[in-house]
Image (tube, rainbow, N blue to C red):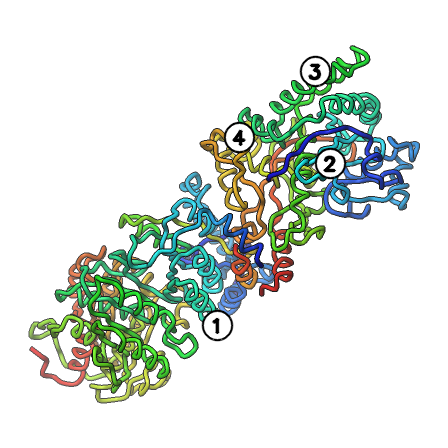
Amino acid sequence: MSGNPVWIDVLPAEKVIPVLKDKVVLHAGPPISWERMCGPLKGAIAGAIVFEKWAPDLATATEMAAGGGVTFHPNHHFGAVGPMTGITTRSMPVMVVENRTFKNRSFCTLNEGLGKVMRFGGNDQEVLNRLAWMRDVLGPDLGSAVRAAGGIELKGFIGRGLSMGDEMHQRNVACTSLILRAIAPWLARTAKDTNRLAEVLASIGANDQFFLNVAMAMGKAIMDPVKGIEGSSVVTAMCRNGTDFGIRVSATGDQWFVAPVEMPEGLYFAGYGPADANPDMGDSAIVETIGVGGFAMAASPAVAGFVGAGSASSALAFTRTMSQIVVGENPQWTIPALDFAGVPTGIDIRLVADTGIAPVINTGIAHKEAGVGQVGAGVVRAPLDCFIHAARALSNKLGVQ
Amino acid sequence: MSSVRKESAETGSVSRRSVGLLDSPVEVVNVGLEGFYQELKLAGVPVVHVSWSPPANGDPKMADILSKLGA
Amino acid sequence: MSDFILNEVRKRMYLDSVALMRISRVIKETRGVREAALMMGTPSNQEILADAGLLADSSKGAQGSDLIIGIRAESEMVARTALAEALNQISAPKRQSEAETVTEPRSVRGALKIQPNTTIALISVPGEFAIAEGRKAITRDLHVMIFSDNVPIEQEVALKQEAQKLGRLVMGPDCGTAIINGVPLAFANKVNRGNIGVIGASWTGIQEVTTLISKFGGGISHAIGVGGRDLSSQVGGISTLMAIEMLDSDSATTHIVIISKPPDTKVIEKILERVNKSRKKFTICFLGADDIQVPWNARFAPTLKAAAELALSKPIDSKPLKAGDIRFREGLIVGLYSGGTLCTEAQYVLMREARRSVTSNIPLKGVSYLKPDDHISDRVIDLGADEFTKGKPHPMIDPSTRDEMLRNTLRDPSVGAVLLDVVIGYGAHSNPAGNIAAVLNSVPERRAAVIASVTGTDDDPQNRASQQAILEQSDVIVAASNVDAVRIALNCVQSGQGMG
């Protein structure tokens, strides 16, 4: 946790992830074949193929994907993360976050906003048009601004956001506003056209979840250096692809431990219900590995409303319970309602497997059919089996029987 | 193994002072039957009850391994 | 005639066995239900369910963390109604405490954050998980008391060796009682404090000796249970030796009593060697092991009563009996014990003082194993033994497990005297005497004399005096100690004279 993550740039993905120069689609979660992918993931992939002009329409794109015309890899294999479907292709702009303590970099696409969006499997013209604007306007302009600012240190935003009711997964209102305050002058200084500047500012200002992707890239930048510490049982990544849930653990490096992903529980938008829900998706659970999201529920009673009784005391209970499965508390990120206790940080597989307390993840709920988009929000539990498999692997590695 | 040990030293709340059984006031952690907790509490003995459930989805062998890993 | 078997598996739902058995009992009493059990789905429990004809194929995939509800009833409708009631019972108590339990610690590690100065972990989880919990406790510098039984002995040895290296004491497994600094743990009695330290490989043995000492003017500094197998050759007395060490350097203790069923010979040597090095006085009570050479500072006691007498340095008066209490009845003596060591003590006295052969399910040397068709031997049965408690509560928690056997014994014309123990104190049933009285009253035509002793004190929650009064109202002869109870039984069946 001694990392110092700094947002240093926004660049087209292929510039920082060389493998994307080919017809490659990065997706959320552990590795998965086309056949086993869920509807929204397939839909998003088809949309991305059309977006990159590898196919003229969605039907052809789907055929191409099914026929091996594109290659799939998890974001996590390339230092990247993406929310929900997590689709990353070559021309999409990604934020570049550098952990200045360890010099490692991580990447995450820009947040598309609410409604019909690719991260929830949306793929129609409206979705693709927005992606094009992000590629041509939002990405380049943010990149210029961040570069001009000399990078933006991120850790402080989290601390302030926690005291303003954000938990950085489902609620990012405060942090989005804070980072907009920080970056607006630089956007203005580097702007060539006031209308275009207004568009960019309005788009960030209208998207409460803008900061989610920043937090994710930051989370990845913080956790990557934790990889490969001998004997360490700390979780370095948690993610899901709508079919499998996968975790990585420090001592076992790049190995994935997977189990079937669970269904989120929560509240649905009008007209939708649990029968419409897709199993959980996204690399966004990286934020829980650094102690925010579901682990910082106590900071965000408003989010607790999505689950159970929804009382403020139940929000405290979530965080207190999570504190039983972590290595420690992060004194830099504190929660006022818990007498300024630090957020529970560093999920320990031994403690998860031992207590049976499954990490809680705040999440959006996607429609199970491609193209529909978000239908609700709630929480999901990481499946215990991942942690038990990982503990077994760790014990084999250490020769403990 | 060294790193697991080191880590548990960091995480195991505070490094607790080693105490003799007979020369310090009895304070109990109760793991299992709740009745024992209730009786100690009634008797005014400091006691905390652990809301226990079988570790590792109820696999005794894995539970044993977890205890050896420093869970 | 063909019963309907209904199973329901609740994934990852844990309730402790006592709670489950309580519900099982209620469901079993439903009209039309032949058998019912709620159990966690461990392999051994699944075996029990299968044996009871309660396991349906639908439960085959259940794991140890899953709850299985098994019901066998005369019809599907009865079974379904009973299942609904079982589910009702499960959810009923939870609702009240949900708010409280939400942030309860889920591990020893979590509990220590709340109470960092904890000294002892009291562990009573199912036996197959007990050692893992013990290990987590000793590595966090706790001493451990393991109440759980059915623990593999090699695991016990491993844990005790690890604990020894860390300087932590492991009391148990199968340790039912301890009194540390005046605090009774698990099944223990409220006794006077004093200068006598007790170490016991037997749970009811400690209870009998500490209560006798307390009742007759002495007091207890600490009582340390070590578990029934500590003095076996495999374990080698690790905990007993550590306990001697602790009491030897404890300034409140001047006299140390060691209680065990007959230990391994090699282990006895080791223990006595250590005793010999102490300057304190010792009483060695190895039940049934006569003729042991003890060191200069020790005396040997063949019974629990004798151990209490040596520790007190005075004889214990047997309760003076009213004339007419003893009526001669020809017949066998049958002891139905909830306390294992009391059962062993009874065997010893019968073997030494009786006229005929003695049998038991936990036979001492010289006593033969219980035979089903044996109608000429006295028999004493330990109802707390594994064969009676696997999947069932210990008779001290639920004395009703003794009911049916007691009823049959009372109806058996070949029985002249029935011996019972009534063990009270913390952890024990709230009114075991009342339970016995109810059974006795349901068999008005009984001919056998019923003799009992109450192990406990007047400061115990159940109150010894009132337990005695309840028994006496049902025409039970209540003796001052277990040894005295056995002697009264012998008198009943041996002579028509009585004692008074």
Quarter of the picture holding the C terminus of chain C: bottom left
**Which residue carries the number 4 mark?**
A299
Q: CA distance from mark 2 to mark 1?
A: 50 Å
Can residue C409 be seen here? The reply is no
3D distance between C-alphas at marks 1 and 3: 70 Å
The answer to whether dots 4 and 3 both sit on one chain is yes
Q: Which is more toward the observer, B55 or A378? A: B55
Q: Which residue is mark 2?
A: A82
Against A74, is A395 above or below? below
Would you name the residue on which mark 1 appears? C154
User: Are circles 1 and 4 on residues that touch, CB within 8 Å?
Assistant: no
Q: Which label was assigned to residue A185?
A: 3
Do dots 1 and 4 share one subunit?
no
Mark 2 to mark 4: distance in Å? 24 Å
Residue C440, given in percent of the width and then of the height, sits at 23, 67
Q: Secondary structure at mark 1?
A: helix
Q: Earlier in the sequence, mark 2 or mark 3?
A: 2
Which residue is found at the position 20% from the left and 65% from the top?
C211
Left or right: A23 with respect to C345? Answer: right
Identity, as a three-letter code, of the amino acid under mark 2: Gly
- Under mark 4, the amino acid is Ala
Asked if labels 1 and 2 touch by Cβ distance under 8 angstroms, the answer is no
| Image-quadrant location for residue A4 | top right
Vertical position of residue C398 compared to residue A190: above or below: below
Image location of residue A357, percent across then percent down: 54, 47
